[in-house]
Amino acid sequence: MTIDLGLLLLRLLVGIILFVHAGQKWWGWFNGPGIDAMTPVFASLGQHPPRPMIRLAAMAELAGAVLLLTGFLTIYGAALAATTLLVAGLSQCLKAGAVMAARGGGEYPLALAAVSAAIGLTGAGAYSLDATLGTPLNPGLTWWTVLVCVVAPVLASIPPTLRARALIARGRKDPSASR
């Protein structure tokens, strides 16, 4: 029971954070900047083209949030969250040349990516739609959960991270390249 409450708390925490981040990016909710003001931010992080990348990130965050909040298909919600947060964190680290947030790095999204992956590996717990509906998608730590929650997010984050690395490096050499 204690483990199930802990998993519920973690799912709710990450789900709410993802929902708020998506709302801030896309619609300017929760005192967020909205898509127009996020465009130069995504461009500076090497996420090009920035507007479609903002929409993709916000959609992944919203879908991940709903799946984690409800505990439905939790393994996939965790994978979406881990992938999106991994790209965000790595992009911030590349831009800042540092990991720690105090230096502009992406430690916060990287930590949330790890928590998301851990939720996927552990399962949603008893207080979830997966448990209520008997969804057989998370039988515990198996090759499938490791593939979906760890390997797939890492592999999916490689192309946008490499593209960000190249664009950030080009922008450092040529200030007009990031416009």
Image (cartoon, rainbow, N blue to C red):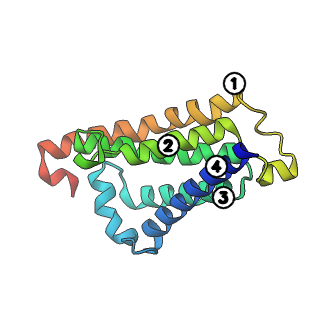
Residue type, numbered disc 4: Gly
SS category of the residue bearing label 1: helix
The residue depicted at 54 percent of the width and 63 percent of the height is 19
Distance from the alpha carbon under mark 3 to that under mark 4:
9 Å
Q: Which residue is mark 1?
A: 143
Q: Which residue is mark 2?
A: 113
Q: Is residue 124 visible?
A: no
Residue type, numbered disc 2: Ala
Residue type, numbered disc 1: Trp
Residue at the extreme front of the image, as rendered? 2
SS category of the residue bearing label 4: helix
Distance from the alpha carbon under mark 3 to that under mark 2:
16 Å
Q: Is residue 7 above or below residue 57?
A: above
Task: Report the side of 44 relative to 110 (left or right).
Answer: left
SS category of the residue bearing label 3: helix
The residue depicted at 48 percent of the width and 46 percent of the height is 112
In this rendering, the label closer to the viewer, 3 or 4: 3
Question: Which of the two residues, 172 or 121, is positioned nearer the viewer here?
Answer: 121
Q: Which residue is mark 4?
A: 77
Task: Report the side of 44 relative to 53 (left or right).
Answer: left
Q: Which residue is mark 3?
A: 69
In this rendering, the label closer to the viewer, 2 or 1: 2
Q: Is residue 97 above or below residue 80?
A: above
Is tag 3's residue or tag 2's residue first in the polypeptide sequence?
A: 3
In the rendering, at what x and y percent does residue 130 appear? Answer: 79, 49
Question: Which of the two residues, 42 or 128, is positioned nearer the viewer here?
Answer: 128
SS category of the residue bearing label 2: helix
Distance from the alpha carbon under mark 2 to that under mark 1:
19 Å
Dot 3 crowding, Cα within 10 Å, few <14, some 14–19, many 20+: many
Task: Report the side of 68 relative to 93 (left or right).
Answer: right
